Image (tube, coloured by chain):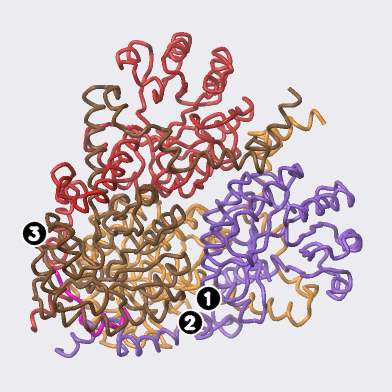
Chain colours: A red, B brown, C purple, D orange
Amino acid sequence: MGVHDALSARIAERSGFRGLWASGLGISSVLGMRDANEASWSQVLAAVESMASATDVPILVDGDSGYGSFNNFRIFVRRLCRLGLAGVCIEDRLFPKENSFSASNHKLAEIDEFCGRIRAGKDSQTSDSFSIVARVEALVAGVGLDEALRRARAYHGAGADAILIHSKRKDPEEILAFARIWDNRCPLLIVPTTFWNTPASVFRTGGISAVIWANQGLRATITAFSETCAHVLAQESVSALEERIASLDELFGLLEYGELRAAERRYNDGSSFRQERRTDEFR
Amino acid sequence: MGVHDALSARIAERSGFRGLWASGLGISSVLGMRDANEASWSQVLAAVESMASATDVPILVDGDSGYGSFNNFRIFVRRLCRLGLAGVCIEDRLFPKENSFSASNHKLAEIDEFCGRIRAGKDSQTSDSFSIVARVEALVAGVGLDEALRRARAYHGAGADAILIHSKRKDPEEILAFARIWDNRCPLLIVPTTFWNTPASVFRTGGISAVIWANQGLRATITAFSETCAHVLAQESVSALEERIASLDELFGLLEYGELRAAERRYNDGSSFRQERRTDEFR
Amino acid sequence: MGVHDALSARIAERSGFRGLWASGLGISSVLGMRDANEASWSQVLAAVESMASATDVPILVDGDSGYGSFNNFRIFVRRLCRLGLAGVCIEDRLFPKENSFSASNHKLAEIDEFCGRIRAGKDSQTSDSFSIVARVEALVAGVGLDEALRRARAYHGAGADAILIHSKRKDPEEILAFARIWDNRCPLLIVPTTFWNTPASVFRTGGISAVIWANQGLRATITAFSETCAHVLAQESVSALEERIASLDELFGLLEYGELRAAERRYNDGSSFRQERRTDEFR
Amino acid sequence: MGVHDALSARIAERSGFRGLWASGLGISSVLGMRDANEASWSQVLAAVESMASATDVPILVDGDSGYGSFNNFRIFVRRLCRLGLAGVCIEDRLFPKENSFSASNHKLAEIDEFCGRIRAGKDSQTSDSFSIVARVEALVAGVGLDEALRRARAYHGAGADAILIHSKRKDPEEILAFARIWDNRCPLLIVPTTFWNTPASVFRTGGISAVIWANQGLRATITAFSETCAHVLAQESVSALEERIASLDELFGLLEYGELRAAERRYNDGSSFRQERRTDEFR
């Protein structure tokens, strides 16, 4: 499940997802920035750090194109490993990139140079279980299935642990064709943002290892927030909303306010500051 | 309107709100932290910086109790002024504080010490139009209307530009009683989280200058994100959601992706990197 | 004077410098990173924010090549204006860049693309007094005086307020030749790191507006810290050092600890926390 | 050895120190802030993160008084563990604190409350090898040896792995008296900033496990930077300095610029951006 901040990560984990996608589009959007490398790698890192602190499930980080050269990417990989993230996805484009669905043109990186980025990342990871997923943008760029396969093979050969094969068609045909030929050489991930209408069973039988619902949650929050704004402005009241939105207690439950209360008893005899309590005794 | 990140700030501005409340509960929640000064003042500052960069309307920042002593508060005020925020609200409690609706006990600051914080803040602001709002927690703490008034008068005397009188009752009676006696000595703000059922007309005629809908938007996003998660897990599909959630184009519109495209034409002849375009010419 | 953190900025200001250079080499070095865009633009921004908070003199920020495309640069410019910095210098190279004195090869940006970055920066500044300095790396890249002049003219035409003409020769001849032909079309800045042996009078009469001593201060601190380490390890004592290093009182004076004491008296009756003092009364 | 940023950490490691002290005074000073909890815990965390990234030796972090209550401290401990720091030192004072050598008054925390902070920290560490050092400020506060011992015993009982016994006397007598009675119950650390004149052999035979030279390196850099500024202003030249300060090559060596060059060959065939090299072929 795609998440965009620590709260959405916590909700997704509580809902039962066993893995999270730290969406680059999501992280930049909540920062008020466009998915065109406007947010710096260290801002992205701060965002995923808060996600990792708030959850226990593996988080795959959307690393865009690696924020520059192989050197920028390996700096990012080292920091992710230090923070305990599960893996990073890097796509075969140049810096700065633009979102796959908004870009006016779509330049791909040279295969050799991109393989250098992957190798630099693999050589720099400090945890054995860390995964690097190579995202192939060839189908999005419209250069064809053969080129997509050629790239996927090269990236896998350079050390990529999995391939994310991306498409912006409304049907899954080119993805499924890719998967057939790929024949499970390594795990395949997809992001069915445009071909959302395909049943999961098709992916399951088609050789896809994982589906990333990258931005539907974010888009649902945009609608919900917009509608709340419109309602409040029009009605000058939240009365009709109260029943339909999470209560404060639900929020407090999500973030475990009860644990803080229990910890105060354990570490502080119930007062949040010992000196306050003591002062009371003299009143 | 209460906002919790730059995206919600942008939405609220686009919806027509002429002023925003950078909610401490909201900012800490999206960081996965509890509203008990778990987020540092510099993390809050980074959040409001991104809100200010993404909007043009005035933003009043929830400054909790000022993050420590008068000295911590004035450091925060100087940074807010530098970033162009419109004002800050400080409440008469100690550090670390807990959310008014979740705290097990509710200690108030000494009046003199809190007035020192206000004066330090006013002396430190570098913009004449910057406002410091003093939040009176006396009614929440249950120490009565007289104490609330005594505190409000002292805070106003110390330089507070407005008073936020807080209550956690389900009816507005104590707020309205306060406002009657206060008699518009300076603007009064309220946060009707618990007495949400009161029509705005009551506040309007009752001497209240502004109403802050602090967390309804955030709570709506929690519901929306949770429901999306549950739906995806249950259905393994987003088909039924697509019609009900914002499209990617709406998101791109909110964050003005079109401006980036236009700027590329203006500054770059339409390619995001001149050297890429040039390379193409040789292909 | 080149500075690398807020403390060095404060020292340089106190020493009498009327303008500071926030050195990219310096900032990245104290972060333990190489001057090859390893530090993100937001890390650089945080560093210059602390410098600006600690000083009152104008600070010119070393903006490397602008951290990517025209779009990354204008984001950086907007943030600098918001923080009150005096200006930024941008050099005509690609992202990621490497330090002019360490790079193995030295690629220059295309003139048109770089002019686009300058124009985007000028169009984005929100303060009239903000300056954008274009740094010409043509001499360092070894492509000759004519190319350097051609570039400087184009950059000035695109809106650059001043030109920084860089050289890595040990003598100032090519710089002086450039200045003669440039004929004060706009102010010229230089960084005589390699041609340090030239007297300032030569620059003064040669048409140079300002000299940046970019890294000598940083390099002096490296020597001082290294010698302190060696001494402590060898002697297991600091006795011989005490007379030669700044006292704690000098440090406290630099950072105005006395002001904090005075402010405590003004805002807090001399105790750093009112509740502490009150508690005392009962002891 | 006390260090204040990643560069000083790297120098100290290269000099041969096998452990580093991330000084709170040092970190706040280079941020231009006073050692009175003006820097937030997350700013301190960012500083020690860069130190940890730049070195391989254990780093003990000066955690001041834990940045608030037990809850703030355990948040800090979790983050430190995540980043791989070796340990943290927490002192028995309230938030905000002021530097031991500059404070006008010196309030100590209640023993029970401080033990709660220690217990909360120990319960929150996620690495078995992480150490929490309790710093006893009783001697600095002038409340006597018995109180210092009473506190040290309580803190050790609460889980502290070591005790830092602090003093601001010019002789080591009270420290040595403490150590005699303590009798190696757990390791003892000292910071001989004021009693610097005592030979290390006295500490070695006196039962002290480790000596922290906390701020001498920082103070040496202040002198070096100040003298460089004065020289440049007076002489308008750096000629007389060049021989006495580290060369750029020394700085490049410290930060391993050579490794970047070698990595470019390995991952990029020697060019920092593959597309640049390719472009060249067509020139």
Q: Look at 42% across and 87% down and name the residue there.
A: D171
Pointer 1: what residue? D216
Q: Tell me residue A204's x, y (percent).
A: 32, 14
Pointer 2: what residue? D196
| Residue closer to the observer: B163 or A167 | B163
Q: Tell me residue D71's x, y (percent).
A: 24, 61
Q: Look at 54% across and 38% down and name the residue there.
A: A66
Residue A238 in magenta stretch: no
The reply to the same-chain question for discs 3 and 2 is no
The quadrant holding residue D88 is bottom left
Chain letter for the residue marked with disc 3 in the picture: B
Q: Secondary structure at mark 1?
A: helix
Label 1, label 2: how many angstroms apart (C-alpha)?
Answer: 10 Å
The quadrant holding residue D186 is bottom left
Mark 2: give few (<14), some (14-19) or many (20+) Cα within 10 Å: many
In this image, C184 relative to C71: left or right?
right
Label 3, label 2: how many angstroms apart (C-alpha)?
Answer: 63 Å
Q: Amino acid at mark 2?
A: Trp
Chain letter for the residue marked with disc 1 in the picture: D
Please indicate, yes or no, whether residue D260 appears anywhere in the rendered image.
no
The quadrant holding residue C126 is bottom right
Q: Is C60 placed above or below B193 here?
A: below
The reply to the same-chain question for discs 3 and 1 is no
Write down the region rendered in magenta: B106-118
Pointer 3: what residue? B170
Residue B107 in magenta stretch: yes
